[in-house]
Amino acid sequence: MPHPDHEKNRYSWNQVVELHYNHLGYRTKEFLDGTSHLKRIELEALGDVAGKSMLHLLCHFGLDSLSWVRKGAEVTGIDISEKAIEFANKLKGETKLEAEFIRSDVLDLIGVIDKKFDIVFQSYGTHIWISDIERWAEVVSHYLKPGGTFFIVDSHPVEVLFNAPTWDYFTRDPERTVNPADYIDRDFKGNGEYVEWQHPLSEILNALISAGLTIEHVGEYNHGYYQVDENWYSDKDRYWYPPGGPTAYPLLLSIKARKM
């Protein structure tokens, strides 16, 4: 049975996919002209992916998925939003790149795909949409081949204490936002509700360990992945900083793990 709060998010995400696809902030036109949407952290962490199979969780409309295809990976992208999958297939058609895109809630994915992968990848602005981090870790582990790699780079959980100070780092209660403003186009107001969950770092790591993965590396970074406020600025790697420059607290987190 679909998770009711995940369904609220699916409805809200469906409203913004086309906006994101056409927004300058997502650089879709540049991608169509041949650039990559990937950033330094994930490129350095995963290295040469040529010939490797990759499952990309919460792939949105496929910019990262197809960027990995350009690096030689064989990619399957998953997203809860059918509109995201529609535009991922549109982008695939426009680029003539081969990938498979499937609509599914990540927590319901086991049984939807009948294969294992060398890499499971997830990035930027995703773990807050997952209500059950233990089930999520089970999905990650299920789809990894023995010896396969999981890699996630995303907002650091402690970041909410600075950029969303009404949140509690340890809360188990979801944060609900009615008619939310869009993070890439603040003039857009959605019709519906976003539901987000806070996951402390220990919860994420312990869920992966309990699912049978071995943690190989944890990274923390003093820059963000999007323009939190209008006065934030970016560097050549497309990471973002507040006016004072690199922060004294982590904004990004990466985890690399392996299934033995």
Image (spheres, rainbow, N blue to C red):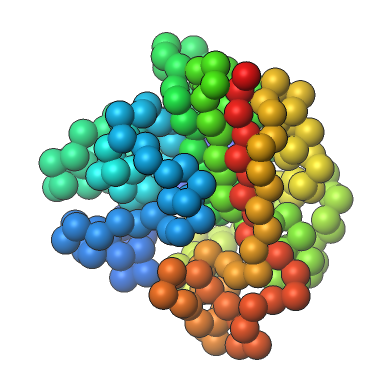
Query: Viewer-proximal residue, 114 or 185?
Result: 114
Quadrant of the rendered image containing residue 6: top right
- Tell me: 217 left or right of 158: left
In the picture, measured across the screen, residue 126 lies left or right of residue 235, that is right
Judge by depth and name the residue closer to the eye, 257 or 26. Answer: 257
Between residue 53 and residue 102, name the one nearer to us: 53
Residue 178, horizontal then vertical, whole percent: 62, 58
Q: Residue at x 56, y 34 (%)?
A: 150
Q: Position of residue 194 (x, y in %)?
A: 60, 52
Who's the residue at 63% across and 60% down the image? 252
- Residue 36 can be seen in this image: yes
Q: Could you tell me how many numbered marks the image carries? A: 0
Left/right of residue 193 with respect to residue 120 in the rendered view = right
Residue beneath the point at 69% across and 35% down = 215
- The residue at 58%/78% (across/down) is 241
Q: 207 left or right of 41? A: right
Using the rendered view, name the quadrant where residue 132 is placed: top right
Counting from the top left corner in percent of width and height, residue 87 is at 28, 45
**Is residue 12 at all visible to an observer of this figure?**
no
Quadrant of image for the C terminus: top right
- Image quarter of residue 205: top right
Q: Percent position (x, y) of residue 34?
A: 19, 57
Instruction: Please determine whether, in this image, residue 183 is positioned above or below residue 208.
Output: below
Tell me the quarter of the image containing the N terminus: top right
Q: Is residue 120 above or below residue 138?
A: below
